[in-house]
Image (tube, rainbow, N blue to C red):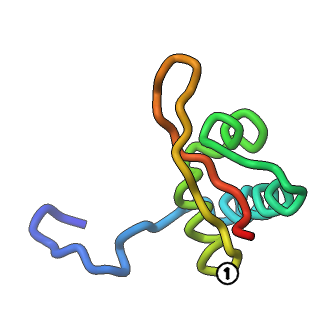
Amino acid sequence: MTKNEDITSNDMNINPNNQSSASQCAKIKDWLEQGNIIDGMIALNLFGCFRLPSRIHDLKERGMKITDRWKVTKTGKRVKEYLLAI
């Protein structure tokens, strides 16, 4: 794509590694269905997932009822964590 070409909606969020995304979604889905909560560090450490919000979006698009909330870490940082909606 050259600088002058318009970006269409079809060009957005293209993932050249769909197999990895699908695998991460499956692992995250299983994790949440076991009653666990997940945040970015858990996703990275357990599943090699750098883009947890994208995987959560994918799962929601497939019909999973997932909610989120903010938590404060020991160092005072605010991070999102995700869990199954009740």
* Residue 36, horizontal then vertical, whole percent: 81, 50
User: Which type of secondary structure does the marked residue at label 1 adopt?
Assistant: loop
Q: Which residue is painted at 46% across and 67% down in the image? A: 14
* Residue indicated by mark 1: 62
Q: Which residue is painted at 58% across and 19% down in the image? A: 74
Q: Is residue 32 left or right of residue 64?
A: right
Furthest residue in direction front, as rendered: 86
* Residue 86, horizontal then vertical, whole percent: 74, 70
* Residue 56, horizontal then vertical, whole percent: 61, 62
- Residue type at numbered disc 1: Arg
**Front residue of 76 and 11:** 76
**Neighbours of disc 1 within 10 Å: few (<14), some (14-19), many (20+):** few
Q: Which residue is painted at 64% across and 54% down in the image? A: 82
- Check the image and report above or below for 13 versus 35: below
The image quadrant of residue 45 is top right
**Front residue of 49 and 53:** 53
Q: Which residue is painted at 67% across and 81% down in the image? A: 62
Furthest residue in direction right, as rendered: 34
**Front residue of 47 and 2:** 47
The quadrant of the image that shows the N terminus is bottom left
- Check the image and report above or below for 86 versus 9: above
**Front residue of 69 and 16:** 69
- Check the image and report above or below for 28 versus 40: below
Furthest residue in direction top, as rendered: 75
Q: In this view, does 9 lie to the left or right of 82?
A: left
What count of labels does the image hold?
Answer: 1
* Residue 44, horizontal then vertical, whole percent: 66, 38
